[in-house]
Amino acid sequence: MHEGLVTLETGTNGHAAPAQMRRVIICAGTGCMANGAMKVYERFKTEMAGSGLNVILELRPEAGDGEVRLSKSGCQGFCQMGPLVSVVPDGVLYTKVHSDDVAEIVQQTLVGEQVVERLLYRDPATRKSCRGLEENPFYARQNRLVLHECGFLDPEDIREFMLHGGYDAARKAFVEMSPEEICKKITDSGLRGRGGGGFPTGRKWNAARVQSSTKKYVICNGDEGDPGAFMNRSVMEGNPHSVIEGMMIAARAIGANEALVYVRAEYPLAVARMRRAVADAEGAGILGKNVFGTGLAMKCDVMEGAGAFVCGEETAMIASIEGRRGMPSPKPPFPAQSGLWGKPTIINNVETLAHVSRILNQGPEAFSSVGTKDSPGTKTFALTGHVSNTGLVEVPFGTTLREIVVNIGGGVTDDNGKISKGGFKAVQIGGPSGGCLTQDHLDLPLAYESLRSVGAMVGSGGLVVMNDRTCMVSIARFFMEFTQRESCGKCVLCREGTMQLLALLDDVIEGRGDAGTLALLEKLGHAVQAGSLCGLGKTAPNPVLSTLRYFRQEYEEHIFEKKCRTGRCKALLKPEILEAKCKGCGLCLSSCPTHAITGEKKKPHHIDPELCIKCGACAKTCKLHAIEGV
Amino acid sequence: MASTPVAVDRVSKFEKLCSILEHHGHRPSGLIPILQAVQHEYQYLPEEVLTYVAMSLDVPPARVFGVATFYAHFALEPKGKHVIRICDGTACHVKQSLPVLDALHDRLGTSEKKKTTPDMLFTVETVACLGACGLAPVVVIDEQVYGGMTPERAVALVDEIAALEQCGPGTPALATKQRAAEEVHA
Amino acid sequence: MNTAIQPTLTIDGKTVAIEGERNLLELIRKANIDLPTFCYHSELSVYGACRLCIVDVEGRGVMGACSTPPEAGLKVQTTTQQIREIRRITVELLLANHDQQCPTCPRSTNCQLQSLAQRLGVKKVRFKPLHQPVPLDESSPSLVRDPNKCVLCGDCVRMCSEIQGIGAIDFAHRGHDVAVKPAFGKQLGEVECVNCGQCAVVCPTGALTPRSEVDQVWDMLADRTKTVVVQIAPAVRVGLGECFGLKPGEITTGRIVAALKQLGFNQIYDTSFAADLTVIEEGTEFLQRKTEGGTLPMFTSCCPGWVKYAEQYFPELLPHLSTCRSPQAMFGSLVKAMLPGQLSMERKDLKVVAIMPCTAKKFEAQRPEMGVNGDPDVDNVLTTQELAHMIQSAGIVFEALQPESFDMPFGFYTGAGVIFGNSGGVMEAVLRYAAEKATGKKLDKVEFQELRGDSGLREATVTVNGSQLKLAVVHGLRNARVVAEQVRAGKGHYDLIEVMACPGGCIGGAGQPVTTARNARELRTKGLYQADKMLQLHKSQDNVFITECYAKFLGDIGGEKAHHLLHTTYQSRRRINEEVLSLMQSRREDKVKVSVCLGTNCYLKGSQHVLNAVLRHGEETGRENRLDVRAGFCFEQCEHGPNTMIDGEVIHHCTPDSTIELLNTRIDNDPPDRK
């Protein structure tokens, strides 16, 4: 298989593609597939053939006359608008394509060279429709390096990956470079871990490289557990070979010959694509006993997680791979010294590894030419929540929050999905380990240090936008509940501490809080932060502490005024029967188990808040929707 | 004879169990993939099967039990025929996934503690982020992902399955599953 | 400067030398700072979960001292305002999820959680009480598991798996639901626990405690129709004092006798007498095996934890175990056989209580073979701790007691019997006997220093009568497993192997007083060797009462009566003997029960094909309602595999065809009306 590829013209890392064939690309990421992308793909097959077009489903070195290639790609990151269909080199991007739209696209665009206006993306801010990526602010304002190939290559075709320069960097690493040189290049680039703490990747590799062990391991952390982040899923689904190539380079750099991708179980498609990619790379002789003729061996396995957020923590992941409960152990020793089976091990995030080949191909300078001095390169954020354009956003470090939320994201939306000018309240960055950013931070350049200084963190890069109808105490509780549920239960501070933090937040939300509640929340939060065994516990209080820092007033309203300004905290609502609506039918009166409702027939009834237990029985019986706050 | 299909099923499952253990070389380090494969076969992890796994890997049953109860994906009790999973990731949460969950619990008479209906047709559970945040809120029914859920739509989906179950037992679920499988593997 | 040679670091401003300590905690303790911890034990792996031993390391922040290796130049603060607050919050968090029924807890006054709360000045728990009561596990004859007191430090889990190699309990569930429990939430009495109780030894709270039989003994003492005799084990005399403020290892034999008399026991005897008897029987058995080509090596059998362990995991080695009962059991059996006649009373009116350093002895006493027609030879077993409770409960001021002497004859003993209480003692005592017997010459040098020591696996070669004996002394069952596996593999070539389940032997038993003194085991051992030294006789064969006992009652050493009263048999207790997976069930009375072994050995020899053939046959011939088919695990006849058990009979070398043929004959032989 590998030999056959030699005849193909080899491009350089995806930028100069070979002879451009006309192509229809269907996004086949999880989001688009859920919305019927495969039906669209099948329909294209039949419609294109029926229209006399010469449909090519296989990769070919050169285009013949009238040939149009139909291919699938990985996630293009604009999931909300899926299924996405793009036509190149025409530069047309269709959104929300239904299988019934396919005939029209084939006739109009492929045969007739016309654009189907109604399927183009319409910028909600300007109401202008955008023909392709260049006009579409969601894409145009990004700097897609890692994501570019995800939306372009067929993830299930190793030849296409190689045609665009894939595995060139790995070959270079194995054939031309020494482990020291590789580590130096990565160190020089300033690449930092994209999965959480932002530890310098080069330093991590070096620490493992200098260990004198005959057995070492490389683990790719694809256990993307932060709710609201999905860039790793996207890369594993969309460009799995780039992950394998990154691992190969890492393995060469530290002297390992075994690698393992740990993918969380919620990503079946990523698991399938990674497995297929490994098999194809083995078939192509890239992985195996004799990598690039160097005599060096390289083996790669894919392991599926079993549903435990904590396994994203390095030592817990190792325990899980070894067949144990995924409970973290104290560091030191660090995995680079003693990791999997007690051997030196490096664990890198998917996105981190996806950057590696580019650094070897284009040099560390090119990598660090974007981003900031301390946080070089680009970072992918998963933009979700109350924002017009949700999806994956890859921008250089240092980009402001405003650019992402307003310009790329198209602005904040209300609960009905309509643009809401001035509706911005906060952004939760970094998932349950991160913190919130407010109006005041809209012009903060996003980078490791700047975020840490305001009590947040890059984390895995989840950006959840929240509008003014969001109760910040409830949001803090949501994250607390998540970490509490996902705590492995090993160390006291995390196991019991998160439970008590949750109980204290419940006090606030349910109106039982008092002057001491906030002080205790802060004290306990700081203790859990400082004293917990692993990263999960150490960051668990962040959402509470950061909302307390920026939205203290909201907490105080809950406590002292027994009021939630968004009305989301049900316990604080005052039960009330609206006089204007109530016709005195008496249905509610008989349904109330605590006899809290009184009133005469045909006259507006009243509800005694003291007696009411807010069971909601009355509201259910009321046909006139006259009862609120129960 | 009623016992025949059960016995056949038990035998074929048991053969599969043996081959799973063999595939992993009876190594304790393979415990998690072994349990995943076993659960795939049995739909859950029966106690006697776990004991058998422990014995053949030469690890204490308490350890196997400890691993099986640590990970959210392992079920020690049988699940319903149709598994409905509501994503409670951040994006889904802020887009009101809880009302969807409540509506489903209401419709099926299930709860957080009692996840499966007495007729073993439905299991309702929440899951950690599925990474389909762009489609929030998301519900997955028998591996098929449904985005932009509302309480009404979710209940309608359940009604549809329940109706199919009544008129032709067995077949519709299979069809849904197959469809989903095709989409994933295509 | 010698700093280049001797690396140092700073603890609370003081320079401390690093001298091979494995972690900061050891170093800090060396500097005489008592850092609190629940989950650190020098003999167990580092766990790092209780977060109490946290320290502040300059430039690195708050870290667990137990898990941080010492590095030259570190600046460590053991107490800062922040650390004090975290420790206090940690204890409060634990208390908030604890049942706090302290006054009625068996560990009250020696509970580490309780003392730490005092030490850290916790006056009020600021957090919500979250504790949800769960039922106690009282299924085990030896231990009580009270999950309501558990702080989840995992010491018991690591002890059970790392030192004892069992893993009967482990963590289950996740997050706030985490609990330590046996597999599938079963009870301790239903699983492979060997009752050694080492989990209770390391438990910092009252979550695992020895099961108390004090109330039954009070009732017995109050019953005037009963004569209650008591035996005390060697290790008790060097432990009990700790409950009354004495140092570990201090010998309190005479005061114990006095206390027991005061408590109302009728006769006070010493288990050491029975230990002397064990030496004679076991030594004779060993010499016989050696000279007559019996099964060797021989394992000692006085430790009930080890015996159950062997029955569970090494049933094929059971012929290697000495058939001798333990001293406790020999005592009970002998006394209940001799005394009723002598005192003209009925057996049922004689009660035997044993004071033991051990929780597994409670299980041993309940073994059906250790009794006559359902009447146990030993009625109740009290641990050292329980005896202390009785003494305290009666208000006896132990320290002020005047020493008294044991009753005769079963209160007479030699030093050989006394050293049974520590690891290596049984071996040494047997050698003192065997060496003299084998040579026929008087043995002058009675101390075998080569057998003494603290290591969990010691080997020695001793020359007796010109031939070399290869000996092994192990304590801790994981070490026992190492040796047993060697024996099973035909390696090692030992002659005699002493096994004690508990670290250090009986002096480290789970019935001994709870201690935080790190050298308690060492001091107790010293105490027993001291007791041996102080006695005039050091060899069991010199015990005149033993000689008299044989002459007047038992007859020959190893003879028929001695065998009947002093020896026993063992049973395989493989965790799952035959039935693992039920594959075809039959409710009919005339069903044929088939169990095909799928243990590794049989499986490799193709037993799976046999099983499949049986099942297919059942289906094809419509006989599934007659067949009850199970996949079995191991019938311990691996050399004859594949094995199938049909209606309780093990068939060797099965093939699919032969098995089906056999089944057919079974089913066809039935009268037709039953089909």
Image (spheres, coloured by chain):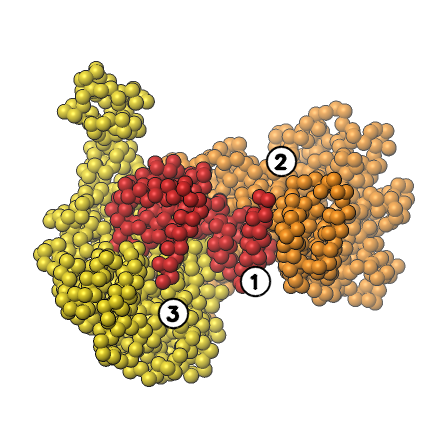
**Amino acid type, mark 3:** Ala
Q: Is residue C289 left or right of residue A343?
A: right
Mark 3 → mark 1, Cα distance in angstroms = 25 Å
Q: Nearer the viewer, residue B156 or A7?
A: B156
Residue at 42 percent of width and 57 percent of height: A305
Q: Which residue is mark 1?
A: B22
Q: Nearer the viewer, residue B48 or C585?
A: C585
**Amino acid type, mark 1:** Glu
Residue at 37 percent of width and 82 percent of height: A4
Q: Is residue A396 above or below residue A595?
A: below
Q: How many numbered tags mark residues here? A: 3
Instruction: Please check whether the numbered discs 2 and 3 fall on a single chain.
Output: no
In the image, which is nearer the foreground, mark 2 or mark 3? 3
Q: Is residue A309 above or below residue C215?
A: below
Q: Chain of mark 1?
A: B
Q: Is residue B69 above or below residue C393?
A: below
Mark 2 → mark 1, Cα distance in angstroms = 47 Å
Are there few (<14), some (14-19), or many (20+) residues within 10 Å of tag 1?
Answer: few
Mark linked to residue A277: 3
Image quarter for residue C333?
top right
Q: Point out residue C463 in the picture as x, y percentages from the top left corner.
A: 79, 65
**Amino acid type, mark 2:** Ser
Q: Is residue A591 left or right of residue C201?
A: left
Mark 2 → mark 3, Cα distance in angstroms = 62 Å
Q: Colour of chain C?
A: orange
Residue at disc 2, secondary structure: loop
Residue at disc 3, secondary structure: helix
Q: Chain of mark 2?
A: C
Q: Which residue is mark 2?
A: C212
Q: Colour of chain A?
A: yellow
Q: Are marks 2 and 1 in contact (CB under 8 Å)?
A: no
